[in-house]
Image: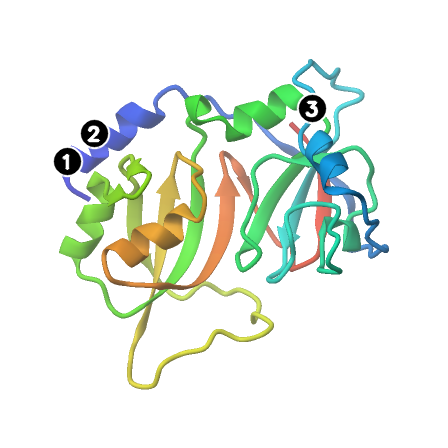
Amino acid sequence: MSSRSRSAFRSASSSQSPSHLKQQKHSGSVRSGASHRSKSHQRKTSSVKKTPTSPEHRKVIIFNKPYDTLSQFTDGQGRKTLADFIPIKEIYAAGRLDRDSEGLMILTNDGILQARLTQPTSKSPKTYWVQVEGNPTEDDLDKLRLGVELKDGPTLPAQVERIEEPNVWQRTPPVRFRANIPTTWLAITIIEGRNRQVRRMTAHIGYPTLRLIRYSMGNTTLGELQPGQWKEITM
């Protein structure tokens, strides 16, 4: 990474001060029927009220969202939702993942914590393992490190590194590859959270994303969670 991009990223993320996490023993992968509510009710319950929650009443869940699952508890079209896996009531996602993306989600009943994890001013870093089509050069990756111009404005500098193919689960359905075209795995860390941002960033430099797994948010990582599994933690 160039000294210019490292300096810009350090400046953008200097205000972050992640809390220490202590994982609890409670974990599971529980399925239940997803309830169907009106769209207006979904909007009313899409986030937690931003009021303090005492530590003894706070709930924080980490979840490995499978591919083809919505980042919400209700859906009127019969698609898979969080309710198919998590039986806990009155918790809400701190940041969403696209239906075609996988990996870490944090859910909580604490509105202050939810805001701290998701609002741009918090500058909480999120790291994604990204499989792209093709073999980008360092010059290509430097564009992401410095920021690229998307339709909704320039991105902040990202941390981008090549990585070996991670030892993760097989996706269902599997990724479709094009014959004779290599793929490359990248670790991309951003402090923003725009809609489909990482996918748009790699497409902008000419390397479409084939698979995207969110590995961490702040100091919280997926750990050993498999798709559909969740665990309660303290934060």
Secondary structure of residue under mark 2: helix
Q: Residues within 10 Å of mark 2 (few under 14, many from 20)?
A: few
Q: Are marks 1 and 2 in contact (CB under 8 Å)?
A: yes
Q: Is residue 188 visible?
A: yes
Give how far across and how far down residue 59 sits, in percent: 75, 30
Secondary structure of residue under mark 1: helix
**Which image quarter: residue 148?**
top left
The quadrant of the picture occupied by the C terminus is top right
Give the residue at mark 2.
7
Give amino acid for label 3.
Asp
Give the residue at mark 3.
110
Q: Which residue is pictured at 41% across the width and 27% down the height?
A: 123
Q: How many marks?
A: 3
Q: Are marks 1 and 3 in contact (CB under 8 Å)?
A: no
Give amino acid for label 1.
Ser
Using the image, determine if residue 86 lies above or below residue 107.
below
In the rendered structure, which disc, 3 or 2, sits on the residue that comes first in sequence? 2
| 3D distance between C-alphas at marks 3 and 2 | 33 Å
